[in-house]
Image (cartoon, grey):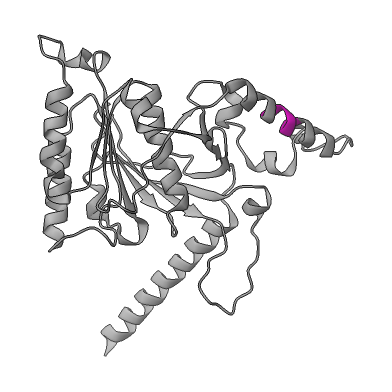
Amino acid sequence: MGSLILLEQDSNTAYSKIIERCFLSAGVESCHQIFYHSPNKLENSFKLYYKGDEAQKQSENKKQQDIKNKLETKGDMKIAWQYQNDSASDMMMSGHAVSKTSNTGIFIDLGKEMEVKDAEQRVCVKQVFDQSTVLNELQNFYKNETPSGPCNPRMVHKRVAFRTLISGFKSSFWETDSESQDFKFLADLRKNTPINSFTMVTMPSSLVQKRHRRYFDACISVASLSAKLNPTTVEYEQGSIRKMGYHGLIHVTKCNNSMCLNPAKPPSNEMAFKFKKIGGLQIDTIHLPPEESVETERNEKLQQILKSSNKSISDLF
């Protein structure tokens, strides 16, 4: 509660929009007051969906597990006996999938769209598309929806909770004169956020800097594994993560630590997700780093070595 999350969008913003819609739909199911802002009224990602059937979700998971069991080999393993009943994909996963460990959470059915009128019968839904007045509108929204009367500040979230989404920050439709105005906007947003609000800001990953992450408690980057549409001469090769049915990767770029002022990354930083019609994105923790991330890390280290070698040679002359 009271935290700000930065979602670094994927290249085509397809999966990030799904996360935005699931974020808002889960807020309606949890009876949170909804506030949505997008710099463009015509091309916004505001959509609400109904809650999915958990029994149907469990039946689909059971069918997938039965298919995996049929494909497994029946030979006994003498050395790696702990992986006897695991498939090739299960060996790379830590076994902490959300759908396997527990049935908690809200399953969103992306095939059942909810109208705004139905959502307004349960909670207050406010949409703002004017960038110049979004902070004032947000401050008035918090003030008007907060119940009057004495209340313990630590227990105010049990009376009312908010869910705020700022979509498309610094996107092509975002109007700004300088970077200082953008940083001031983030500072004012963090200042006006109460302790009983969930706030998410989405931003293109190519424009994210370390300075932007300072204003957030957690930062998550989404990367799509689909083939890019840009013209290229390199032949597309499907990676091992894509062969296992995963549609993208998730990296935690920042996570605040309650025991220390220095933000740290969790040990399970490598995660992959599958897009499902019921449930949204199923996120699994990868036990081994995928081939794509290993290759990018090697390229970054190689570039750093080349830069350092060029500087050392230039210093001699």
Query: Above or below — where is 310 with respect to 48?
Result: below
Query: Above or below — where is 154 with respect to 315?
Result: above
Is residue 121 among the parts visible in the rendering? yes
On the picture, is 123 further left or further right than 50?
Answer: left
Residue 288 appears at what percent x and percent y? 59, 46
How many numbered discs? Answer: 0
Residue positioned most to the top = 150
Image point 75% across, 39% down: which residue? Answer: 87
Image point 13% across, 24% down: which residue? Answer: 144
Image point 78% across, 35% down: which residue? Answer: 67
Magenta includes 128?
Answer: no
Magenta includes 63?
Answer: yes
Residue positioned most to the bottom = 317
Image point 57% across, 33% down: which residue? Answer: 278
Assign the C terminus to one quadrant of the image. Answer: bottom left
Of residue 197 and residue 80, the one placed in the foreground of this image is 197
Of residue 31 and residue 5, the one placed in the foreground of this image is 31
Instruction: Tell me which corner region of the image, top left, top right, bottom left or bottom right, holds residue 277.
Output: top right
Residue 224 appears at what percent x and percent y? 51, 55
Query: Above or below — where is 210 with respect to 190?
Result: below
Is residue 72 among the parts visible in the rendering? no
Residue 309 appears at what percent x and percent y? 38, 78
Most frequent secondary structure within the magenta stretch: helix
Of residue 176 and residue 292, the one placed in the foreground of this image is 176
Of residue 283 and residue 92, the one placed in the foreground of this image is 283
On the picture, is 86 further left or further right than 173?
Answer: right
Assign the N terminus to one quadrant of the image. Answer: top left
- Which residues are drawn in magenta? 61-65
